[in-house]
Image: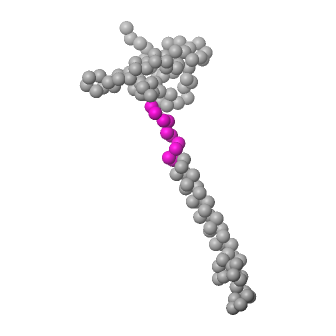
Amino acid sequence: MDGIPPERMVTDSWPALNGRPVLRRTVAVGLVLCVSVGAALVVRGVNALTVGRTGHETDRDRAERLAGLHPSQHPGVGRYYVPVGAVYTHTSDGAPVAYLHYRLGGGKAPGVGDFLSAYDLPDPGP
């Protein structure tokens, strides 16, 4: 090659690193770490933006949350009682009001007492 010393080839990325294997290895490891951290941050960002989005909340979800019977409010409790009807509205003064109608969805000997104990509800009064 004309005018290029033999110790420096055109294909050398960083001619100053030629003949320094420890420095070359350190730069390579640093680049790999930077790319890995960058990829992890991208994955973390995408995950943070997409996880937890439940979509459109329905009147049934709002009514269950208002009544304190939503599954997220009682972790570990089986879903034996499935709401089949819900009305969620507001009174004239703006207070939310909900009506829920449940059906049994399975379980061992489900009943009113089991429903009340599953959701930590008091016994109904007169």
64 lies above or below 41: above
Q: From the top left corner, tell me how far across and down residue 71 is, in percent.
A: 50, 28
Residue drawn at x 54%, y 25% as measured from the top left: 77
28 lies above or below 57: below
Residue drawn at x 59%, y 12% as measured from the top left: 109
Q: Quadrant of residue 80?
A: top right
Residue 126 as seen in the image, left or right of residue 50:
left
Q: Nearer the viewer, residue 35 or 110?
A: 35
Q: Quadrant of the C terminus?
A: top left
* Residue 116 in view (yes/no): no
50 lies above or below 5: above
Residue drawn at x 48%, y 22% as measured from the top left: 119
Q: From the top left corner, tell me how far across and down residue 114 is, in percent.
A: 52, 16
Residue 117 as seen in the image, left or right of residue 1:
left
Prevailing secondary structure class for the magenta stretch in the rendered image: loop
> Given the current orientation, which residue lies at the most extreme front position?
2
Specify whether residue 52 is painted magenta. yes
Q: Which residues are magenta?
A: 48-57
Specify whether residue 71 is painted magenta. no
* Residue 51 in view (yes/no): yes
